[in-house]
Each structure stands twice: as structure tokens, then as C-alpha cells.
Image (tube, helix red, strand yellow):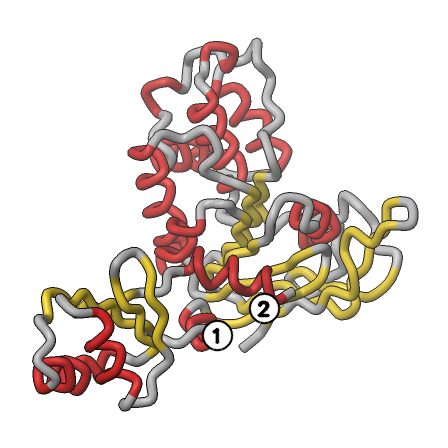
Amino acid sequence: MEHAIWSQGLTRRFGKTKVVADLDLRVREGCITAFLGPNGAGKTTTISLLLGLLKAQAGTCEVLGLPPGHAEALAQIGALVESPSLYDHLTGQENLEITRLMRGALPSDGDRVLKLVDLARDARRPVREYSLGMRQRLGMALALLGEPRLLILDEPTNGLDPSGIQDMRELIRNLPKEAGTTVFLSSHLLAEVEQVAEDLVIIHKGRLRYQGPTTSLGSLDEAELTVRVGDTNRALESLRELGFPIREAEGRLWIQAPADEAPCIAAALVKQGCALYELVPHKVNLEARFLALLEEA
């Protein structure tokens, strides 16, 4: 499959510090890829390099098959990086019209994106009266003008309430199948990312730590089962014979074993005469896997 974003050895320094270090990116076209990392990991700098806002000091990069900042590529890219730049004294619709004219989008496109981000009713209000969430949604509308092939988003849910986050999630999730748009999404909300992203790119201190399908990151951790019993010591004796690693925490036993081993574990406990109150597969979520990966790094 072709790559919407491709880089080899991408590097950017500020002073003596490598903020982006030898980064090899492979972002599949037509997919939603989440770009993750702690504060200061180099995410915003990387996005600025992809958009041609900063120049790389080493390595090569292509965005939609063209160098970063190339006019033909920029015409096919929508971007929302940090907080949107808006004219506060103008209305939302006037802000949108200025960008529409610069991008050469159709007049009807303004109405389309306002409906997409649920700002049609507030379009004639001055932007200085907008809440932070409304400003973020207007920034998203600006990025969607012209039906871009690639949408680069840096914290798009910043300032949104839970309802707004859900609406934004559904909007982003539908873009690849409805418009064929590739989405490259930077976010700190890992629970939201897990629900929309097919692929992940994780960086830490400017270096690549993981790249691949969201589901494959789970292979970095074994599945766990939580067990609550009447006699912990007796249960430990019984379960250790099965050979699974076990730890005790929060009044429960945590067993590193896949969910399909649950019947075998339950049978062993009952055979030993243990009162079994609870046996539950424990899903290791993206946040836990993400933190474990950073600890390894």
C-alpha cells in the first residue's frame, strides 16, 4: 500500500538537542494513524517538518509523494496544528470564507464543513464570542475545506466537552471511508485514540518507539486474568502448578494467561477446594501498553 507520509532519518535539532532524531515514518494512505508521545516527545516539531513549517537538518521526507511544503502537496493537505489562528473581529463564516478563497474551494464547501463540525447556527457570530471548543471546531472546519487527501491534526479535541469529543471522534472515524482522507492524528487522549486509530506511531525523546497496527501493540503485553478467592494461599499453591506467572495486588491474584485458560484455572481452584468469587479477563488498554513502552525506552 502507498504511504501518505514517508520519511527516512528525519532529524531536527534546536541547539545541541535532537528534538526529532532519525525518524522513519510510514503512514498508510486511506487510514487513521495516531501519533503519540509524552509532552516534549517531538510530535509538534515533527508535524511542522511534515508541513514545511520547519526544515529538516538531516534525512528525507515525502508527503503525498512530494517534498514537505511543496505547493501541490499543500493544496491537498488540511491541517490543524495546536490552536487555530483566527480573526477574532470577524464571524466564523467570514473566517471560513477567507480560507476558502485562498484554497480555491467551491462556495458550497463552506456550508458543508460548517455542518460537519456543527457550527452552522453560530457561523454569523464574531469569533471573539466563541468558546475554546467552538474555536477548535472552526479550526477543524478550516482544515476540511477542499476535501483534502491528507488531514494532519494536532490535539483536535482540545477544549471540547465530552459530547463534543464524541462528535469529533465520529467525524474523524468516518473521513477515510466517506472522503478517502488519510488522517494523521496527534492526541493525548489515549482512550479516544484507541477507538478511532488503525495504526499507531509512538515517539519518545524524538525517537521512534513503536510503529504498526493498534492491535499489534497488545503483543507487547501478555493477557491477564484477575481472580478473587476465599483462601489466597491455597489458590497460589494450586495455580503455581499450572506454570502461569502470578502476582498478588488489590486483594486479588493477577495471572498472566490468555482468556481461553480461564476454564482450566477455575477447575484447578475448585478441585483444590478454593471458594472462587471472581474470575475475570483483564483487558490491558492502550494507556497501559503505552506507559509500559515508555518505561522500556
Give the residue furthest to the right: 16
Q: Residue at x 78, y 61 (%)?
A: 21
**Vertical comparison of 277 with 16: above or below:** below
Query: Quadrant of the rendered structure where residue 103 is?
Result: top right
The answer to whether mark 2 and mark 1 are in CB contact below 8 A is: yes
Name which residue type carries label 1: Leu
Frontmost residue, 203 versus 252: 252
Q: Residue at x 52, y 19 (%)?
A: 94
State left or right for residue 215 relative to residue 88. left
Q: Residue at x 21, y 76 (%)?
A: 235
Residue 84 lies, in percent from the top left, at 58, 29
Name which residue type carries label 2: Tyr
Q: Which residue was labeled with disc 1?
A: 220
Query: Quadrant of the rendered structure where residue 130 is?
Result: top left
Query: Quadrant of the rendered structure where residue 14 is?
Result: top right
Spatial CA distance of label 2 from label 1 is 10 Å
Frontmost residue, 214 versus 223: 223
Residue 75 lies, in percent from the top left, at 64, 48
Q: Which residue was labeled with disc 2?
A: 210
Q: Give SS at disc 2.
A: strand
Residue mark closest to the camera, 2 vs 1: 1
Residue 19 lies, in percent from the top left, at 78, 51
Frontmost residue, 79 versus 112: 79
